[in-house]
Image (spheres, rainbow, N blue to C red):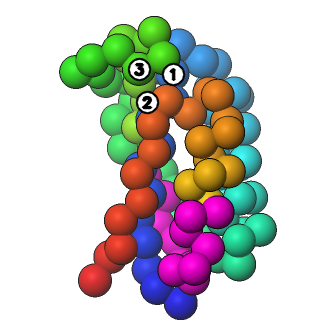
Amino acid sequence: MNKYEMVIIVDAALLQDEKEKIIKEVSDIISKCEGKVINSQIWFEKQKLAFRMKKKTEGTYYIINFEGKHSELAKQRQLIKLNEKVLRSLIIKVE
């Protein structure tokens, strides 16, 4: 199992409960793809975006550290893309 770091940007205008639900859904996706969430936290609460994403100008950044199989990353990315409330996501491998 490799260690990865994921950054998720969601709409800052959403209620806190909705944001937590989105992060829970992303954590469930990681678990479904044979991964294990180590840590998840808010990185930036309300940050102005450099450019519009899905007609939004402000976003909340979350950082999620997890372990998982490399072969499952494509499936994770695809499932996260299907969530319309996630403006952008990025997964990188941690050395």
Local secondary structure at mark 3:
strand
Q: Is residue 88 magenta?
A: no
Residue drawn at point x = 51 percent, y = 80 percent: 70
Residue drawn at point x = 28 percent, y = 83 percent: 95
- Residue 31 x %, y %: 72, 69
- Within 10 angstroms of label 3, few (less than 14), some, or many (20 or more) residues? some
User: How far apart are the two marked residues, 2 and 3, measured between alpha carbons?
Assistant: 12 Å
- Residue 4 x %, y %: 43, 72
- Residue 15 x %, y %: 64, 19
Question: Quick check: marks 1 and 2 in contact, CB under 8 Å?
Answer: yes
Residue furthest out toward the left: 50
User: From where the camera sits, is residue 42 visible?
Assistant: no
Residue at numbered disc 1: 11
- Going by the numbered disc 1, the residue's amino acid type is Asp
Read off the magenta span. Answer: 63-75
- Which residue is more in the foreground, 58 or 55? 55
Residue at numbered disc 2: 60
User: How far apart are the two marked residues, 1 and 2, measured between alpha carbons?
Assistant: 6 Å
- Is the residue 55 above or below the residue 19 in the image? above
Mark closer to the chain start, 1 or 2? 1
- Which residue is more in the foreground, 76 or 30? 76
Instruction: Give the mark toward the camera: 2 or 3.
Output: 3
Residue at numbered disc 3: 53
Local secondary structure at mark 2:
strand
- Within 10 angstroms of label 1, few (less than 14), some, or many (20 or more) residues? many
- Going by the numbered disc 3, the residue's amino acid type is Met
Q: Is residue 73 magenta?
A: yes
Mark closer to the chain start, 2 or 3? 3
User: From where the camera sits, is residue 31 visible?
Assistant: yes
